[in-house]
Image (cartoon, rainbow, N blue to C red):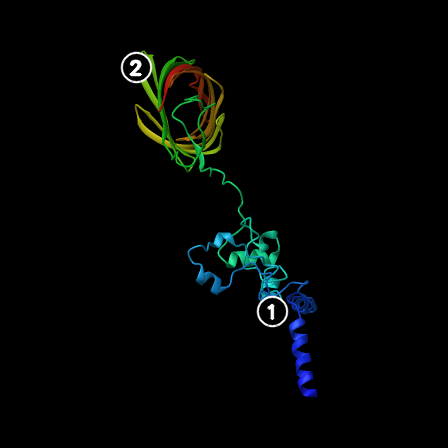
């Protein structure tokens, strides 16, 4: 009889133990394990449906209707705590906060590592800026809405070759007529120019018409280029031809083109080298005006030869027409 009363007392106590008291014990266990008073996913407080509920109501079930609270699920389990610590939280963190962000999106180191491991990638850096691919030389100064010659090229614009063709005429103060021709090709992407220029001098004498040609073939590098300025250094092969034949040489040059505002173009160039046995010096300056893709310019072109105390001055004023391509 005594045994039956004891068994009945045990059953009565078990029956009187409410779910809330059982949940209290689980929360105590969770707190003792450093789980910050989280409950177990087996309690009635979990908002995630059981597999039986999902199987019984497949037609009405929608994942979006449930938002798993990482603070409640499996918080007291060993693996739940391990996962939470690895993700920078204190409990299982397999769900979202409901706004699409994950618990590890809060800026922690472990949280960021976890998100990358799940394929989330790096934090979104914001809208990408257009990638600049360099300087684009335009066909002529002030083309379209450009402030000078060329602009910074944007993706999709590509590259284009620019060129110039020039013819000019002038007078050497020493007493000779002068004509000239020049060509320039600006290679895109590498800042290189290929250029050629020849001056042809004609002088009437008692013996007849004397002619002389001075020319150069140059490879130039644009060390500075903006819509307003191009600065070039060059290395050139020099050529001189007269009644006796041809002789060669070379020079170093520095040139600048300035585009201060439509329609004005300012240019200057200097070169020093040798032609045969003589030292050759050239200095020229131009002031031009653009009319569509054609430049009308005037200036002064000095070309001098120095050898054995002699100085031959072939310089003088000039004017010309340049077509920008």
Residue 300, percent from left and from top: 45, 16
Along the viewing direction, whichever of 61 and 208 lies nearer the viewer: 61
Q: Quadrant of residue 24?
A: bottom right
Residue 247: x and y in percent read 35, 30
The circle on residue 67 is none
In this view, 155 is above or below 118: above
201 and 45: which one is in front?
45
- Residue 218 in sight: no
Q: Secondary structure at mark 1?
A: loop
Looking at the image, tell me whether mark 2 or mark 1 is earlier in sequence order. 1
* Residue at which label 1 appears: 77
Please state if 229 lies on the left or on the right of 86 as rendered. left
Which residue position holds label 2?
209
Q: Quadrant of the C terminus?
A: top left
Q: Residues within 10 Å of mark 1 (few under 14, many from 20)?
A: some
The residue closer to the viewer here, 59 or 278, is 59
């Amino acid at each position: 009889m005594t045994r039956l009363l004891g068994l009945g007392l045990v059953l009565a106590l078990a029956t009187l133990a409410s779910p809330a008291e059982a949940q209290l014990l689980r929360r105590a266990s969770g707190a003792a394990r450093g789980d910050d008073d989280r409950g177990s996913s087996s309690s009635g407080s979990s908002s995630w449906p059981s597999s039986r509920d999902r199987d019984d109501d497949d037609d009405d079930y929608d994942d979006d209707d449930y938002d798993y609270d990482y603070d409640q699920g499996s918080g007291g389990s060993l693996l739940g705590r391990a996962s939470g610590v690895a993700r920078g939280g204190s409990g299982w963190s397999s769900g979202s906060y409901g706004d699409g962000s994950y618990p590890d999106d809060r800026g922690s180191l472990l949280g960021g590592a976890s998100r990358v491991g799940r394929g989330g990638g790096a934090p979104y850096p914001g809208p990408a800026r257009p990638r600049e691919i360099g300087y684009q030389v335009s066909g002529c100064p002030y083309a379209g809405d450009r402030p000078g010659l060329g602009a910074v090229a944007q993706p999709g614009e590509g590259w284009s070759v620019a060129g110039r063709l020039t013819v000019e005429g002038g007078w050497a103060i020493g007493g000779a007529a002068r004509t000239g021709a020049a060509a320039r090709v600006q290679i895109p992407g590498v800042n290189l120019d290929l250029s050629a220029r020849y001056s042809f001098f004609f002088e009437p004498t008692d013996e007849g018409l004397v002619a002389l040609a001075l020319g150069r073939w140059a490879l130039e590098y644009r060390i500075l280029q903006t819509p307003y300025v191009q600065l070039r250094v060059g290395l050139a092969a020099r050529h001189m031809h007269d009644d006796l034949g041809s002789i060669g040489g070379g020079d170093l040059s520095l040139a600048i083109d300035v585009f201060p505002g439509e329609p004005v173009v300012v240019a200057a160039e200097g070169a020093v080298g040798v032609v045969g046995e003589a030292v050759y010096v050239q200095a020229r300056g131009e002031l031009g005006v653009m009319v569509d893709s054609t430049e009308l310019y005037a200036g002064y072109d000095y070309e001098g030869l120095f050898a054995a105390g002699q100085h031959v001055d072939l310089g003088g004023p000039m004017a010309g027409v340049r077509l920008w391509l």
